[in-house]
Amino acid sequence: MTSQPNLSPVQPGTSLFAETLAEQRAQQFRMRRLQVHNWGTFNGLTEVPIAEKGFLFVGRSGSGKSTLLDAMSALLTPPSIVDFNAAAREAERSGRDRSLVSYVRGAWADQQDSTSGEIATQYLRKGATWTALVLEYANAHGEAVSLIRLFWIAGSGNAAADVRRHYMVAPRSFDVATELDGFDLDLRKLKARLGQEIAHFDGFAGYAERFRHALGIGNEMALRLLHK
């Protein structure tokens, strides 16, 4: 049996159709806040509030617009098709391709070694490090859903295989500054501290199924189209 929305009595000058649309709109989840911690050249925690009616990223080249959009892509797009920095490449057709390693490490320049003459990438974070991305959605009823991804490198490696991944979905707001404070790369300890209301996943498929259900997204195709 399909549950029906709770509708108030129709007022003069209104219609049941209009009230139904209003209730459907109130139930819709919309982006409210993006948090990035140690993502690209955003060192430490950066929070971006997102307006319900729309949000425009503006700034000079290299200011971080594509970096923030790529954070959203990492949260919403299947890893098999995610294309980092696609928007910037379409506009400029130049520059270094970005990768998960370059974002977790904080790649900021390619410099030539004065002795060997070799080109080496310069990183902001060279030892063990971790990255957190959180995209929060909310509706007019005060309900919230947070999509969370963790990445970490335990040593000094710079290969794609060195990056560990974890996925979470929270049925509420999630605050990186307090809830991930002191994260020491021990996932078992983190799970115990966060509690059972947060769903944990080792892969994208289960994570995506959970957040699509929570947000009312019918299938993966919508996410693929959004990434384009």
Image: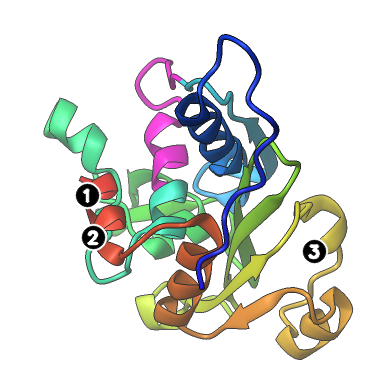
Residue placed most toward the observer, 166 or 223: 223
Which residue is pictured at 52% across the width and 39% down the height? 24
Q: Could you tell whether 112 is left or right of 179 in the image?
A: left
Spatial separation of the CA atoms under disc 1 and disc 2:
6 Å
User: Is residue 118 something one can see in this rendering?
Assistant: no
| Residue 131 at x, y percent in the picture | 60, 61
Q: Could you tell whether 81 is left or right of 23 in the image?
A: left
- Amino acid type, mark 2: Met
Label pair 1/2, CB-CB below 8 angstroms? yes
Label 3 neighbour load within 10 Å: few <14, some 14-19, many 20+ = some
Which residue is pictured at 42% across the width and 30% down the height? 65
Residue located beneath label 1 in the image? 225
Residue located beneath label 2 in the image? 221
10 over 175 or under it: above or below: above
Q: Quadrant of the C terminus?
A: top left
- Amino acid type, mark 1: Leu
Residue located beneath label 3 in the image? 180
| Residue 34 at x, y percent in the picture | 60, 41
Look at the image and give the residue range highlighted in magenta. Answer: 56-70
Spatial separation of the CA atoms under disc 3 and disc 2:
32 Å
Q: Earlier along the polypeptide chain: callout 3 or callout 1?
A: 3
For the stretch drawn in magenta, what is the main secondary structure? Answer: loop
- Amino acid type, mark 3: Leu
Dot 1: element: helix
Q: Nearer the viewer, mark 3 or mark 1?
A: 1
